[in-house]
Image (spheres, rainbow, N blue to C red):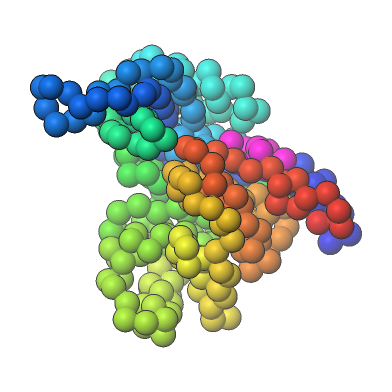
Amino acid sequence: MTDIPMKTRLAGARVLVVGDAMLDRYVHGSVDRISPEAPVPVVRVTHDEDRIGAAANVARNVVSLGARASLLTVIGDDDAGRRLEELVSATGIEAHFRRDPRLKTTLKMRVIGRQQQLLRLDFESPPEGEVLAAQLDAFGELMPGHHAVLFSDYGKGGLAHMAAMIAAARAAGKPVLVDPKGADYSRYRHATVITPNRSELQQVVGAWLDEADLARRAQALRADLALDALLLTRSEEGMTLFDAQGSLHVPAQAREVFDVTGAGDTVIATLASFVAAGMELRAALPVANRAGGIVVGRFGTASVTLDELFPPGPAA
């Protein structure tokens, strides 16, 4: 299999992305004065743009790399949901939307002035139980046709049945990757790998004193949750993978950090795509690190391509 070009291997790889999808709206404008009503800047709006975010952005990153992605998520029967569906349909993602008329599709509106985010407005509400139960049934139908399962947890309530989904995927021999949220990681038990950032991991294991203390805490959590691995993303410090072999660290590769929005989406999407294509987790780690370094140099939620990861030259 190693003689098969990576592009070909990725083209045959299928990743099922399950989780909280959202619409990212950017409102751009110029800032020339302070409001006379309050000490806040006045933004004269010039234009706005919509992008797919969260689990939808993860799926888009999978497709951008040349793999195939299915997206299973719950959205509302509202303008934001319809706009999200429209944007997703243009990406090549195979979408499986479950609609909840009582749900408000998550919309994050960011006001941008002078190339800086001035304000973010969040519109959201949790989905209803019966819609989530239907999502579990859909997962059971979709999962067998995929090489890897990726859970993108943004804490919006769309993954109430994650434990059952993880159990089903692992029983079927599928690698399971989880981008976690919150302080309770028990629902991620038996996943292949989880990918918390520094602040997320500290919520669960507490602050560490040094690298040795970090390794002890990370390995203890990995053992407690029966994970194959735990990948800590560390921003400017790179990434560290903790598994049965010990730890593997790769330094950050960002040339210039412009915006970290969605960087975690790119990292886990890259991992999942290459694992689905048959690459070992340790071998995929430097590739995911490189992808994260590229995307933080761009504004807002973004994605990378295989050619950016492996510029034309020697075969990947």
Q: Which of 8 and 302 is in front in this view?
A: 302
**Which residue occupies 58% across, 70% down?**
250
User: For residue 127, what is the image quadrant?
Assistant: top left
The C terminus lies in quadrant: bottom right
Q: Nearer the viewer, residue 204 or 213?
A: 213
- Which residue range is magenta in the image? 59-69
Tell me, yes or no, if residue 198 can be seen here. yes
**Residue 48 pos. (x, y %):** 43, 20
| In the rendered image, the vertical position of residue 74 relative to residue 247, given as above or below | above
Going by the picture, which residue comes out furthest to the front? 32
**Which residue occupies 53% across, 28% down?**
96
**Residue 101 pos. (x, y %):** 33, 18
The N terminus lies in quadrant: bottom right
**Residue 266 pos. (x, y %):** 55, 47
Q: Is 289 inside the magenta-drawn segment?
A: no
Tell me, yes or no, if residue 169 can be seen here. no
**Which residue occupies 28% across, 59% down?**
183
**Residue 52 pos. (x, y %):** 49, 30
Q: Is 67 inside the magenta-drawn segment?
A: yes
| In the rendered image, the vertical position of residue 288 relative to residue 165, given as above or below | below
**Which residue occupies 32% across, 77% down?**
208
